[in-house]
Amino acid sequence: MGNPRGDSPLFSVLMSTYNRADRLPLAIRSIVKQQYPHWELILVNDGGEDVSRIANSFLSKRITLLNFEDNKGKSAAINEAFRHAKGEFIAYLDDDDQWLPNHLRTHFERYDLNPEAMFHHSDTHRIVLERDRRGNEKEASRNLLYDAPVGFRDFIARNRITWLSVTHRRECFAAVGGLDERLRILVDFDLWRRMAARYEFHHIPEHTGDYFIHRQIDGQMTGLVRKDPLAFLYANALIQRKAVPPDLARLHSEELSAARQKAYVDFLTARAEEFHSRGNERRRNAALSLAAKIRGR
């Protein structure tokens, strides 16, 4: 693929945004401040408020803004961004997270040392920001996330790396078919799980980005997981249904079976509670009966 910047490989940064105009500028600024200069940002506005003023304020021809008329979800937005990406390498950043200036440089140096590598992930800090009644945010806590090497086995039941910590060669995305547009949550877990079934993941033990959790004064967290736990459980069950390569299926058969069973039972149990809250006891009992049958296998 042609590289508009000559011999230095280009990183295509894929980002979707939806009604986060207050946080988006900080995320973009962290890209602009990268010590490695050969990047492009493909930003997809996923049917939210207009962000053209924000994108244009950086006066950079390396930023491409695409707009969806309707909200289609992160998977559709990132897939669209990939279709416009020109880079040899793909990177990701959410619209409310930030990279440190060393992120792309650190990853490029590792690819330069190991040209056969397909996928790298570095360390991330999880920062909880607490908003007071005046709307001001301050850091409440900080801890290191996912600071260890991982392989397919680590992704059988849960996610092990952050969205913002990853770079990979562009062919990895195409080889697994991109993001699953049926999912609006756990899209990163699903993508890494499918990639880990094909490629070796190389860990970079350096802190290169910050993942933010926003907490209100009453302790409530932001995020789809907390707003809609049933959607979270459904997505996990859908992911667990997916086939894995036969060699991995044989090697990890017991763990895969246990993770699949737990995902189904957790979803059906939560579904039963929802039916109960609606007064639909017939469907509640049916969901619990199916959960018991699966648990007994």
Image (cartoon, helix red, strand yellow):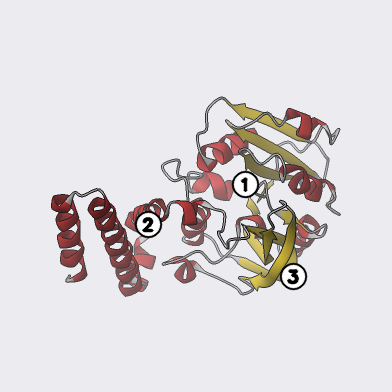
Is residue 195 visible in the rendered image? The answer is yes
Q: Quadrant of the C terminus?
A: bottom left
Comparing labels 1 and 3, the label whose residue is closer to the camera:
3
Establish if 266 lies above or below 73.
Answer: below
The span from disc 3 to disc 2 (Cα, nearest Å) is: 32 Å
Q: Please, what secondary structure does the residue beneath circle 2 have?
A: helix
Q: What residue is shown with label 1?
A: 170
Return the x and y of residue 144 as percentages of the image width and height: 67, 72
Which residue is at the front of the view, 229 or 168? 229
Q: Quadrant of the N terminus?
A: top right
Comparing labels 3 and 2, the label whose residue is closer to the camera:
2
Q: Earlier in the sequence, mark 2 or mark 1?
A: 1
Residue 75 vs residue 28: left or right? left
Residue at image point 36% right, 73% down: 251
Q: What residue is shown with label 2?
A: 233
Residue 264 vs residue 147: left or right? left
